[in-house]
């Protein structure tokens, strides 16, 4: 995987806990400006902005200018790839849980 592919990879983007928290915050709002997102972290605006840039490259976040501020909004469509990947393993987890339940009931 080359650098450009890595930057656009949804799994790479969500691997970081800060970016997952940003996704959560944006999922709970229509859109938020950078200054409001920054208040949720113990880091500066520049660091939060860098995380948002990674999310934008993975197409998980879109931004728009409103006056002098930039507002960010979640684009949940790329998360479907994560959901599909997890769904494959859900069958395994369900079967394992059923086996465990059967063993415990014996």
Image (tube, grey):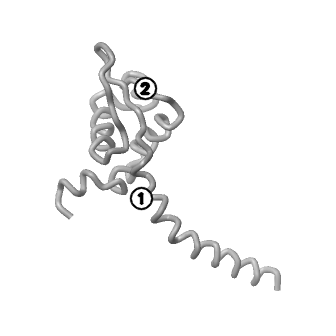
Left or right: where 32 falls relative to 2: right
**Residue at mark 2:** 32
Q: Nearer the viewer, residue 44 or 82?
A: 82
**Hey, which residue is sitting farthest bottom in the picture?**
106
Nearest to the eye among marks 2 and 1: give it.
Answer: 1
Left or right: where 1 falls relative to 72: left
Of the numbered discs 2 and 1, the one sitting upstream in the chain is: 2
* Residue drawn at 34 percent across, 35 percent down: 62
* Residue drawn at 69 percent across, 81 percent down: 99
The quarter in which the N terminus is drawn is bottom left
Residue 57, placed above or below residue 103: above
**Residue at mark 1:** 81
Residue 84, placed above or below residue 67: below
Callout 1 crowding tier (Cα within 10 Å): few <14, some 14–19, many ≥20: few
Left or right: where 67 falls relative to 92: left
Query: Which quadrant of the view contains residue 73?
Result: top left
Q: Nearer the viewer, residue 77 or 28?
A: 77
Q: Secondary structure at mark 1?
A: helix
Q: What is the x, y in percent for residue 13? A: 34, 50
Count the numbered circles shown.
2
* Residue drawn at 43 percent across, 23 percent down: 36
Q: Secondary structure at mark 2?
A: strand
Q: What is the x, y in percent for residue 65? A: 30, 21
Callout 2 crowding tier (Cα within 10 Å): few <14, some 14–19, many ≥20: some
* Residue drawn at 32 percent across, 37 percent down: 52
Q: What is the x, y in percent for residue 18? A: 40, 42
Measured Cα–Cα span from mark 2 to mark 1: 25 Å
């Amino acid at each position: 995987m080359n650098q450009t592919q890595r930057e656009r990879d949804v799994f790479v983007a969500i691997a970081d806990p800060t970016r997952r928290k940003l996704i959560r915050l944006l999922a709970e709002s229509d859109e938020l400006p950078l200054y409001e997102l920054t208040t949720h972290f113990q880091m500066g605006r520049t660091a939060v902005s860098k995380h948002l840039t990674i999310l934008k490259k993975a197409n998980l976040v879109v931004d728009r200018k409103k006056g002098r501020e930039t507002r960010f909004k979640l684009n949940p469509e790329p998360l479907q790839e994560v959901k599909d990947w997890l769904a494959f393993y859900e069958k395994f987890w369900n079967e394992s849980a059923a086996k465990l339940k059967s063993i415990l009931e014996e």
